[in-house]
Amino acid sequence: MSPMMKDEGADSGAASSSRSNCPKGANYDVFLSFRGPDTRDGFADRLYESMINSGFRVFMDDEEIRQGEEIGGKILRAIEDSKIYIPIFSSGYASSRWCLRELAHMVECAHPDSSAGPAGHEILPIFYDVEPSDLKLKTKLYKDALKKHERERGRHVVKPWKEALRKAAEIKGWKVKGQRHSNVIKDIIEEVCRRMTTRERNVPDDLVGITDRVEDIKELLEPTCADIRVVVIYGMGGIRKTTLAKVVCNQLSPLFQGWSFLPDIRESLSRFDGIVKLQKKLLSDLFNLKFPETFDSDEGVNMMKHRLPNKRVLIILDDVDDGNQLMQLAAKPDWFCPGSRIIITTRDTSVILTTKVEGLEESVITQPIKIYLYEMKELHYKHALQLFSKRAFSTNSPPQDYDDLSREVVATTGGLPLALEVIGSSLRTKSKAAWNDSLKKLKEVPHKKVLEKLIISYDTLEYEEKQIFLDIACFFEMKRKTDAFYMWESCNFFPEAEFGVLIDKSLIKIVNGDRIWMHGQVRDLGREIVRRENIRNPEGRSRLWLHEIAYEIVRARKGTNNIVALALLRSRDNFTREDFADLSKTRFLELEGGNFTGDFENIFPELRWLCWRHCPLKLQAKNFVLKSLVILKLSGNIIIDEWSGWVQIMVGNKLKVLTLKGSKFLTRTPNFFGCLNLERLIIRDCENLDEIDGSIGNLEQLKCLKIKWCPRLKDLPDEIGCLSSLRELILIQCQYIRNMPPWVGNLKGLSRLVMEDLGLDRLPQDISELVDLKYLSLMNCTCLQTLPYKIGHLKSLLELDLSGTLIGALPLSIKNLKNAVVKINSCAIKFQLEKNIERFTSYLSTQRPESYAEIMSKGELRSSLRLSEYPIDLFMECGMIQTGYDVFLLKNRVRC
């Protein structure tokens, strides 16, 4: 002990040892604080020696104090450079101002709300021959000592010492009085060992492209707020959700009173007693608890329920795939102390029961908790190339002679970090020949380790979900989902529900409204699963998407009942019934060219989907009746007459979707009496079509009618006005259609009306009857100058697209469309606004400064106006309201 310290009674010491999880710059594992005369020759020395023998670096005694430096300052710095503080409270501890000064500084450094010192320190008190009540100044023992200090040093000096004693009294520690010293010291060593064990999560040193994502999560968590927050990081396997959670945990854990990271919950729960072990780890990490042998999951739930509300914690639940797991680990918001945070990583967002409200995910249980979903997306290309280069070359970019090959390999991974790391490592030091071989294989099959990771999500699917997943992987990537749903429904699947599962499990996404997106590695997983159904004999597989293999099997007449879908592309052959005789289970067939000849009676009994591109002028097959057909898509120069052979395919009470495309010989649509259950009819790119058959009015189930680029079509039959089930009417690039008939007002159920690139010069007032209409597009109707004055009666309208029209003013009734957005790009209205830009910007600068700032920064008006954001008077001042009848109504106070 230093002579200067003996009189004051504070002793400190040190011994060499490796240390872990210390605060930045820590030189010691443990700082011992005690009053020498009370414990120097007994308990303190034995504890010190035991810690040194256990390998800890302990601050104690003057051999650690460099000569010539002020002792007090050195000791305070040693406190800041230590991880764990162990004050030994004895009867004379409070009489030493050095002990009290050390304690106050320990509390300042360890208190989580302190802004003065570093975080990550812990206090483990020992009550040598005193009680916590003495520290709370409820007895004379410490109370009298503090009064003496106040007289000598002043109240302002002693006040933080009193506060430090009270805080230390609240911390669970060891009582030595009446106990065997050896037993107490053993317990202390075990506890210090436990706390010094590295808990920081291990992450690679060379992470790429993660900084922005870490900041995103930290912004969502916002640790300083007093509410309770849950952030769900979701995405496909191998996307590095866990790595992101680890980095965030390492950065934020010091800000909480306790934290726990439960890794790989899905795998842990597959083992015996998995949930109990997870509960024990959680409770041990947060509360340092020990458990009886009979401890079970119900006890775990009860312990968490009673203890979590008392501590501000950070909990990370990694790889959760079942909502029931959450109920036993972090079930209810009222379990948690305000300010607590929970991070969940998952492939399946259905584990969280939420409803979306303007981007915020709020629990359906009405509790003070905020739940945010964060999608972990693929790496940007430059980051993907950098990560790959680090693994393959230990550099940030590939060598020049490997640049092209590296870019090709990176392109096959789709920015999936796991694939980049695994493939990069496997190609390290390999020759260019080996690179080329690997690249060729990677274009067909994912790397084995990537496959093992991705297939976990597939294995959790039910039978129907697997079938839809494999269909998408082989045939429907980036295809519209609407038509495919009809096929799956006819197979007694439930695509709406099954799509929800696939989306929740991050296996697919819906993009651009209704297109099915699947990551390239996931697509290749699906195709590899099919390939492995029969590696040697492809005819034993369920799906044949490679047209060369499909063609070979059909021509060799090797088809089997296993094949449910195949694509025969770029074929000029004439196929006979014998070629398809054994494909009795085929439900999906794509053709490109070729023809059918001979008698096809009872062939393809299960066929639901037939898509035939470049189909022949006439179908040569006889008795080609497809009783189960649901979707028929024909493109090519077909002629639809009784003698052409095509009519027999279109006859069927199960046919729901009919697409006719690209025929220059088609002048009139077929008679629709043979397919009265049609729900979608698409006619496009038929340059000589000039008549829609009136039998269309008998399609009582029709929901969507789309006609695109039929430049000779002038009139629409009045029978269309009888289609009471119609929800979408889409007319595009039919320039000779100049008038929309009044019957449009009869389509009461219409929610989407698209009239783009038509020759329209006016719209009927009857359009105001479409009270359920949500979307109306008149884009590029360059002859259209006005809107019906009753347009404001479209009370459900959300979007009105006037882009590219000559409409320079809106009817006064537009004021009734409070929820509508009007698109005005390249529209006369926009030009009118620009003429009155000073009035418009004057209003914006005072009432909507954010919009004003945007206009000023871009130098132009926005291409859309949300009507609710602007008063009708402003539009009138800017000349955007029609004159004439509307002004007459305004003056006479007649409502439109």
Image: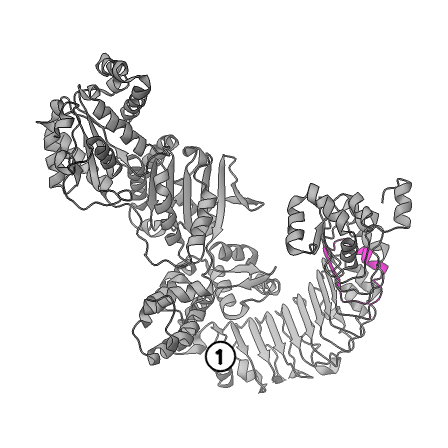
Q: Residues within 10 Å of mark 1 (few under 14, many from 20)?
A: many
Would you say residue 444 is visible in this rendering? no
Residue 185: x and y, percent? 14, 32
Judge whether 42 appears above or below 533 on screen.
above
Would you say residue 478 is visible in this rendering? yes
Q: Bounds of the magenta span?
A: 736-759
For this rendering, which residue is in front, 90 or 271? 90
Residue position for label 1:
559
Determine if the magenta segment contains residue 387.
no
In the picture provided, is 15 more to the left or to the right than 429? Answer: left
In the picture provided, is 511 more to the left or to the right than 791? Answer: left
SS assignment at label 1: loop
For this rendering, which residue is in front, 610 or 186? 186
**Quarter containing the N terminus:** top left
Residue 473: x and y, percent? 49, 67
State the image quarter where residue 674 is shown: bottom right
**Quarter containing the C terminus:** top right
Residue 403: x and y, percent? 40, 74
Q: Identify the residue at horizontal 22%, vertical 35% (top origin).
A: 74
In the picture provided, is 295 more to the left or to the right than 872? Answer: left
